[in-house]
Amino acid sequence: MPHISTPFLIEAALKALVLLFSIVVHEVAHGYIALRNGDPTAKMLGRLTLNPIPHIDPIGSVLLPLLLLASGSGILFGWAKPVPVNPLNYRNYRWGEITVSAAGALSNLALAVLFAYILRLGPANLGLMKLALWGVQINIFLALFNLIPIPPLDGSHILAILLPRDLARLYAYLEPVGFILILVLFYTGIMGIFLMPLYRLIASFLLGLSY
């Protein structure tokens, strides 16, 4: 566990704010693209807002990030309450499922590009540069993590709609154990083996550094 000091607490709080903003944008993107596909559910329930309060999940938005920060983990991620959508409202079910599921990860990649642009502008404020760097790092990881094809992550919805019907039925059996499988892959380091090379590739491209 890292030494707890005032600078450490301030840095941890700022990282948590960047994470919270990023996961809220992620969920709003799902709801907005669902609306564009004909489903107003998220809008009707007041979830198309950047106000974090309706989106906060006690475990994914608060407890897990705090534990990761307190442990000095080099990885910071979390999640918000999933934005409710009703695929039956999509004008085109298949296209709607793919675009709505992909919207979250794409929004995080867009944020990573935006933060990288701010960083490249070289603002004189050191604190702003740190925020921009964390924004790049956190959003790249969020995008890659959510594209993992294990339920309930977004990647699983994309894969399920692309699979032949018989394989999709078999794939659905992963749903009850998906979260446990994600935890096992994370804590055994297997997830990092697959994610980190892609993370380094994208980060080096956006930041112009060797990761």
Image (spheres, rainbow, N blue to C red):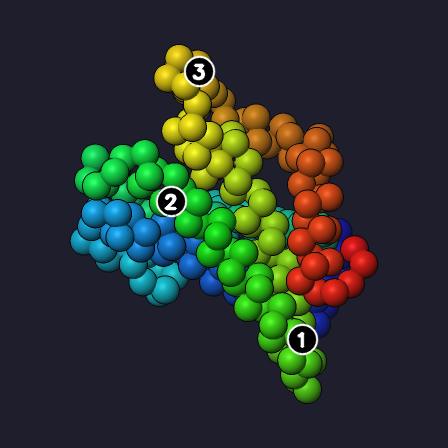
The answer to which image quadrant residue 186 occupies is: top right
Hey, which residue is sitting farthest right in the picture?
A: 210
Identify the element where label 2 is drawn.
helix
* Residue indicated by mark 1: 120
Q: Nearer the viewer, residue 3 or 15?
A: 15
* Residue indicated by mark 3: 167
Amino acid bearing label 2? Thr
Amino acid bearing label 1? Arg
Quadrant position of the C terminus in the picture: bottom right
User: Which residue is painted at 67% across and 53% down in the image?
Assistant: 202
Q: Residue 51, image x and y in percent?
A: 35, 65
* Image vertical order of residue 128 relative to residue 109, above or below: below
Structural crowding at the residue carrying mark 2, measured as other residues with C-alpha within 10 Å and reported as few (<14), some (14–19) or many (≥20)? some
The answer to which image quadrant residue 193 occupies is: top right
Q: Residue 181, image x and y in percent?
A: 57, 26
* Residue indicated by mark 2: 99
Structural crowding at the residue carrying mark 3, measured as other residues with C-alpha within 10 Å and reported as few (<14), some (14–19) or many (≥20)? few
Amino acid bearing label 3? Leu
Q: Nearer the viewer, residue 202 or 45?
A: 202
